[in-house]
Image (cartoon, rainbow, N blue to C red):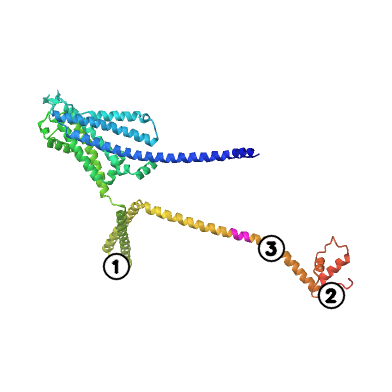
Amino acid sequence: MLNVKVKTSRYLDLPQRHLNSSKRSQSLHMKRTMYHSADRMVERKLIFQKRQYLADFALGTAVASILNSGYSLALKVMISLSTLILVGLIIAYHTVEVQLFSVDNCVEDWRIAMSWRRLSQLALEIVVCAIHPIPGDFSFPWLTIHYNGITVTEPQVPIDVLLSLPMFLRLYLIGRVMLLHSRLFTDASSRSIGALNRINFNTRFVLKTLMTISPGTVLLVLMLSLWVIASWTLRLCESYHDDRHKNILNSIWMIAITFLSIGYGDIVPNTYCGRGIAIIVGVMGAGSTALVVAVVSRKLELTRAEKHVHNFMMDTQLTKQLKNAAANVLRETWLIYKYTKLVKRVNHSKVRGHQRKFLHAIHSLRTVKAYHRKLRDNANTLVDMAKTQSVMHEMVSDMHSQQATVDARIAAIEQQLGNLKEHLGSLPSLLAQEILKNQQDWMEKELMPFTGSSTLPGRLSRQSLSLDDSNSGDSETKLTTMNETQTGQPDLDL
């Protein structure tokens, strides 16, 4: 029996043991998940910092290679080495991007992150960053017809000119560095808010925020950078065909007058390369001019508070003018009536003068009313959304409080109705008791002279009141009872 009980208890404890083991395994899984999430967060932070450093180094290398562009063998070797380093940094940057993608999406195989878009972007960046002047002395003839259509030149131009121009495309790394160093991108709370609102934090978004915060500074930096880069490239294209472009100040002068859409014509491009640069500068100058106009108009625009103050002052002035115009109308009306009805002899010239003043006062009154109506229409568009929101919030809170008061009153009314229902339910029994008591008192009072006692036995009074026609067979008793009820005197025969 003891062995049977032990085996039975073991079988009964199996579900509980299984439940405890599942709870332990679940808690261990949760702990491992938490530890793994913490490790992933730390790894993600380190990858962010590494990517930022790689972008900074890549931009520094690109700018150094652009500034060191020259035709000597030593400079070309240095440019080649810096280009190799830049390509390696670009590959390392995309490797970090793949690692970050794997950490964010919990991907073990890095090949899942290698999409066609990422591969094409990597190949394009490598091609752009790999173009540079190669060591050696190579040249080619460049045939050019000058702007007058008569002069034709064909100088020997080093091939380094064509290889140096695309090096300015490496400046796209400035946008990447701006994005990675932006507070909106590095702040976790900002990124969370952007993700909730489906906003992609990219270079375009960062430029928009910078244009909103400090538009004048951004436009100034953009224009100066454009002038310097365009002047340098124009000098490279035109210096072998026109000696005036060998001085970079002349190239800057031409870029400035082209950017501002002036075009004096004293210095013109001769090659198709220079003409293309002039077209690009003209288009960007028109766009920059439009941006400058928008920024200046925004700076000159009144703020919301200033608009409210201005509208209030204008409304006060127009109200005064309206009152003055109405007073002038009434005055001229009275003067016309005075000089036509209250005088013995009418002076028509004076009446005509007051009539002219009367019409002028009416015209002034209508003009002031029109201005006042227009001002109110403009003021209606300046609705303060924050004030409207606060007013709506107060109205909603008042409605909620009133609704709570109404609910409390309805509950009190329901409780009183319940109490009233209970009292009405007990009313018939109370009435029956009161009627029975009155009948007993009346019977005692009527039978007191014959019984000689002040009270009747309870049994007799109840029996006399509970008599029924079906239980009584004596007609004389019925008649006696009726006579007593009608006359108030008992029957002596009974």
Classify 32 as above or below 412.
Answer: above
Which quarter of the picture shows residue 83?
top left
Left or right, 217 with respect to 442, comes to left
In the rendered structure, which amino acid carries the disc numbered 3? Answer: Leu
The residue beneath circle 3 is 427
Name the quarter where the C terminus is drawn: bottom right
Q: Give the magenta range.
A: 414-419
Q: Are marks 2 and 1 in contact (CB under 8 Å)?
A: no
The residue beneath circle 2 is 450
Q: Are marks 1 and 3 in contact (CB under 8 Å)?
A: no
At x 43%, y 39%, the residue is 33
Name the quarter where the N terminus is drawn: top right
Q: Dot 3: what SS?
A: helix
Camera-side residue of 407 and 131: 131
At x 25%, y 49%, the residue is 300
- Label whose residue precedes the other's in the sequence (2 or 1): 1
Q: Main secondary structure of the magenta part?
A: helix
In the rendered structure, which amino acid carries the disc numbered 2? Answer: Phe
Which quarter of the picture shows residue 490?
bottom right
Q: Dot 2: what SS?
A: helix
Camera-side residue of 54 and 210: 54
Q: Dot 1: what SS?
A: loop
The residue beneath circle 1 is 345
User: How far apart are the alpha carbons under marks 1 and 3?
Assistant: 96 Å
